[in-house]
Image (cartoon, helix red, strand yellow):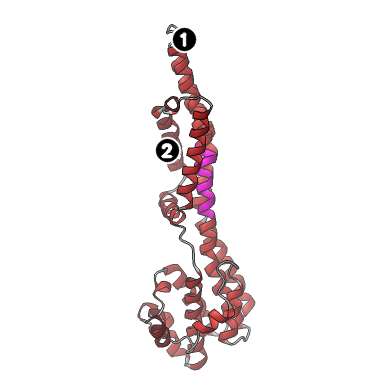
Amino acid sequence: MTIVIGLIVTLACMLGGFAAMGGKISVIWQPWEYVIILGASIGTFIVANPMKTIKDCGTALKEAMTNAVPKKEDYITIMLCLFSLMREMKSKSRAEVEKHIDNPTESAIFMAYPKVLEHPKLLMFICDYFRLILMGNARSHEIESLMDEEIATMRHDKLKSYHSLVAMSEGLPALGIVAAVLGVIKAMSALDQPPEILGAYIGAALVGTFAGIFFSYAVVTPIATQVKIVREKRMRQYIVIKQTLLALMNGAMPQIAIEHGRKAISAADRPTVDELEQATLGGGNPSSVEKKAA
């Protein structure tokens, strides 16, 4: 929503200022200049990126437009899920806990937290590291190193769409010059025309330079920045899980372990100690969570 509002403000100020200076807005409307610039930009974007990244850009743009970032409730849900699994690990046998890890979609614990089940990668991340902890052979510093490596890899993959959009924005000013040069070539072929016609051709050519710079710095770059912000915030969930499980491996009780995870949440979205404590009343068992939801 903020993207749409920002673009409306940008266009209103730009067109309003131009009109206030006495300019004719109709002069800026040169559709074929925009076709050249945006068409060439999209074409080079397709050339430079594999299909997987192109598709992911669509997903990233949708996330940025809807500001699809984890909220306080989402973090509480993740920590409740971890709390329930840790309680299960402390009180049940390895075989009983493995049933939840090996088949999470049919696990009573995971089914109590549908928001976790909705994110397969997040679910896999939780199950993989709980499985390693259950094996009992790995040391905490080894698990931490492995988590850091996996999170860095996921972050790299998630930011490919951001980098591809930045590369696209960097090329737009040059493509604007290309469109302007083509417009000048058209104007040169009309030197025998009256000054008013020739001036219109030259003005249309200069719109290409304007459009390339405008689309680069006022449209694509801000959207790319928003994509990065959203993707970074979504990666924060993995840091919360990492800190919680490391605390567990180092001997912390489940209630203390989720406090370690809580501290890894951004201050704006971090639940308070009381909120988290209230959420875990009843031991974080699936039945108690369902009663609260009801």
Q: Crowdedness of circle 2 by 10 Å Cα count: few (<14), some, many (20+)?
A: few
In the displayed structure, 91 sits above or below 229; it is: below
Q: Callout 1, which amino acid?
A: Pro
Magenta-colored stretch includes residue 217? yes
Q: According to the image, label 1 marks what residue?
A: 195
| Any part of residue 172 in sight | no
In the displayed structure, 24 sits above or below 251; it is: above
| Contact (Cβ within 8 Å) of mark 2 with mark 1 | no
Could you say where residue 4 lies in the image, as x and y percent from the top left?
Answer: 45, 48
Q: How many marks?
A: 2
**Position of residue 276 in the picture relative to residue 286 (left or right):** right
Could you say where residue 140 lies in the image, as x and y percent from the top left?
Answer: 62, 79
Q: According to the image, label 2 marks what residue?
A: 43
Quadrant where the C terminus sits is bottom left
Extent of the magenta region: 215-228
In the displayed structure, 116 sits above or below 166; it is: below
Q: Nearer the viewer, residue 16 or 212?
A: 16
**Mark nearer the N terminus (2 vs 1):** 2
Q: Main secondary structure of the magenta part?
A: helix
Q: Nearer the viewer, residue 157 or 294?
A: 294
